[in-house]
Image (cartoon, grey):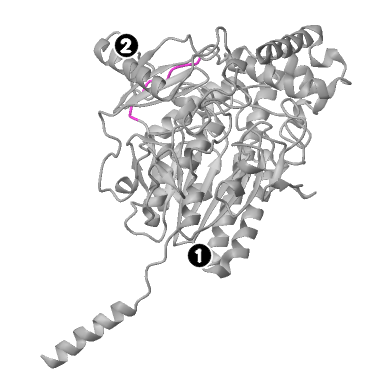
Amino acid sequence: MRRRGALVAAAVLVIAAAPAPRRPNFVILVADDWGFTDVGSFGGEIATPNIDALARQGMRFSNFHVSGSCAPTRAMLQTGVSNHRAGLGDMPETIPDEHVGKPGYDAQLNHRVVTIADVLRAAGYRTYFTGKWHLGRTPDNLPTARGYDHGFALSQSGADNFEEKPNLLLYTAADWSEDGVPAHLPKSYYSSRFIVDRMVDYLDRGQASGKPFLASLNFLANHIPVQAPDADIAAYKGRYDAGWTALREARRARSIALGLMPPGMAMARMPTTSDWDTLAPAQKARRSRAMEAYAGMAQAMDREVGRLVAHLKVSGEYDNTVFVFLSDNGGEAIDPMATRVSRWSAQYYYDQRPGQQGRPGSLTAIGTSYASAVSAPLRGYKFTASEGGVRVPLIIAWPGNPAVAAGAISPAFTHVTDIAPTLLAIAGVARPGNSFAGHEVEPMTGFDLTPLLERRAAQVHPADRPLAYELAGNAAVFQGSWKLVKNLPPYGDGRWALYDIAADPGEARDLSAAEPVRFAALQAAYAEYARRDQVLPMPPGYRAPDQVQRNAMMTLLLPRLAVPAALLGGAAVAGVAIAVILRRRRRRQ
């Protein structure tokens, strides 16, 4: 008995002396404009072995939703709060004059929200950010003012991937900063490589502190301009010669075979998708080459993800790191070569020869038809509230935690506002309520996903609780398996439709007539959301692509008066710009 008592006492002493479990690190990997099936483990043909390896180590979410465009998604990702309450009711590029300055339409992250970096840094984490920010450009709204210890950030929607220059159709200069002050890129630069290089530097510099870290890597791939190293483009030579319809069918079949989509699901064809067979050979060659560049850009980004993972393995941090991979919205459909004004401007500022697509000096985009294909088998693409615009791949992996269901797929409805609360729960850090650091803030509204990760629950969002969303007039309400949705022109007709997105994720069968009570109830839920979040109706005739051009005019026209008027679309374009200027002046008087 004495011996047994001594053994028990010794065991107690060993347990008491054992070090407390290390808090996990977090790596957030945000892809830009990747469609639902761009990742190999979601049904795509693009080589993404490193992201697929994370999928094998963790869980894929097949019913994960974001905003239809980048900045609102990023605001919700950072804060766990809806985009309107976070200040991104619209973006600088798409906001109409009538909404500027209205509540929720700050067009940048407001100061009524706190970020995941704010909360984790207060809890003893070191916090780093690299890549696209797009949540504000003033010193008080760059990453190091919003919770990050260090940050090398682009304040705009996109920029060149080989040079320090902007998308010249939207901006006059590339607005990069480091730790809140203007910064320059190295001469030998490629965006995905640099974003990882800078993060590795930050991680190495802070490793001696022994603190856990939050590393947020925000890639420019695959935002316009689509650009990739020559070898990556060459890897896909001829791969897309069969066209976008064949690609949509192939991705649909693979996503079903992988268990991400229901067997036999219908797939709607977007009215903006052209008939591949009617294209001239030169047109087919141009479009195929653009898609080859797109695939090469995704492959190059995946390679850099692999380099980061390898570094964490060498440093001993890999097993204790939670990885989150997602895209900010579906595939990008805007095509600079599709309209007269942007085509002339692109040809003036860029080398737009067909064989140069994806190379340095080019401005490449895949266009509406291939954007629909990369978001297959879903309807729609970026900007839309259709599933192809707002349903994207999500992978969460924690290699060293056996409780996480490795290789599993969750079909549960999940939302981008869930990410911040989930990471805080894993870190053992309480989410802020209505106040943080003595200031009143918007509380996080997302749900903790760890019950899904550990297979302790089949869903975390209550089936009877609606979740609504709006951006630039495109809107949706989700409740259980049901979705109410409308899209303004040119993406839709502005009318509400109702879908069962569990059985019909492709939104092929409108059930509004068959389910009138549910249809009316979800419309009422949207009206309540719009009242609560102060959602404004769009001005008559509003079209997002046209607004992008008008807002770009305000930024670009006056600084470029030396450019011949014909290259900016001639008198018609000048007239539009003058009208916009006069209208804004009248509103300010």
In the image, 568: left or right of 242? right
Q: Is 533 left or right of 411, judged from the image as shown?
A: right
Q: Which residue, given by chain and number where applicable, does mark 1 sit on?
A: 211
Seen from the viewer's position, the closer of residues 65 and 16 is 16
Q: Is residue 382 above or below residue 143?
A: above
Is residue 269 a member of the stretch shown in magenta? yes
Q: In x, y percent, where is residue 287?
A: 66, 24
Q: Quadrant of the N terminus?
A: bottom left
Residue 92 % position (x, y) = 62, 26
Q: Residues within 10 Å of mark 2 (few under 14, many from 20)?
A: some
Task: Decide which of 585, 385 is in the foreground and name it.
Answer: 585
Q: Is residue 345 above or below residue 1?
A: above
The amino acid pointed to by label 2 is: Ser
Q: Earlier in the sequence, mark 2 or mark 1?
A: 1
Q: Amino acid at mark 1?
A: Lys
**Prevailing secondary structure class for the magenta stretch in the rendered image:** loop
The residue where tag 2 is placed is 512
Give the extent of the magenta segment. Answer: 262-270
- Describe the element under mark 2 as helix, strand or loop: loop
Q: Nearer the viewer, residue 454 or 10?
A: 10
Q: Mark 1: which secondary structure?
A: loop
Q: Residue at x 44, y 30 (%)?
A: 391
Q: Please provide percent x and percent y for residue 335.
A: 66, 21
Left of 185 or right of it: where is 114? Answer: left
Return the residue nearer the eye: 9 or 313: 9
- Please give the name of the residue rendered at 70% of the width and 29% of the height, measured from the top-left corner: 364
Residue 91 appears in view:
yes
Q: Is residue 449 magenta?
A: no
Q: Residue at x 37, y 37 (%)?
A: 445
